[in-house]
Image: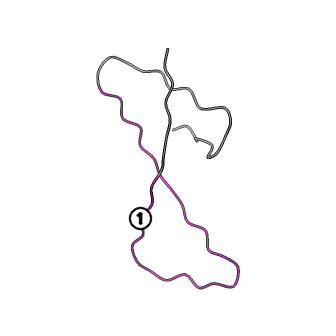
Amino acid sequence: QQPVSINATVGTAFVLKEGITTINLQARLQKYAGEEVMPGEFSGSATVSFEYQ
């Protein structure tokens, strides 16, 4: 696994092989100071941009 920096100006390089490439992402949540953590589901979204040569 290789961390991907969010909002970085320089990306992370992935070696692509012939066929389908899958990039699995994980996220973690951080609570605001003074707020309580409540169990439950959450959702999120990401916009990504890929450049290739």
- Residue at the location (48% across, 50% down)? 46
Which residue is situated farthest in the top direction here?
53
The x, y position of residue 51, in whole percent, is: 51, 25
Which segment did they paint magenta?
20-45
Q: Is residue 15 left or right of residue 34?
A: left
The x, y position of residue 22, in whole percent, is: 36, 35
Q: Quadrant of residue 7?
A: top right
- Residue at the location (63% across, 84% down)? 35
Rendered position, 52 above or below 35 = above
The x, y position of residue 41, in whole percent, is: 39, 73
Q: Give SS at disc 1.
A: loop
**Residue labelled with disc 1:** 43
**Viewer-closest of 24 and 51:** 51
- Residue at the location (55% across, 66% down)? 29
The x, y position of residue 24, in whole percent, is: 41, 43
Q: Is residue 41 magenta?
A: yes
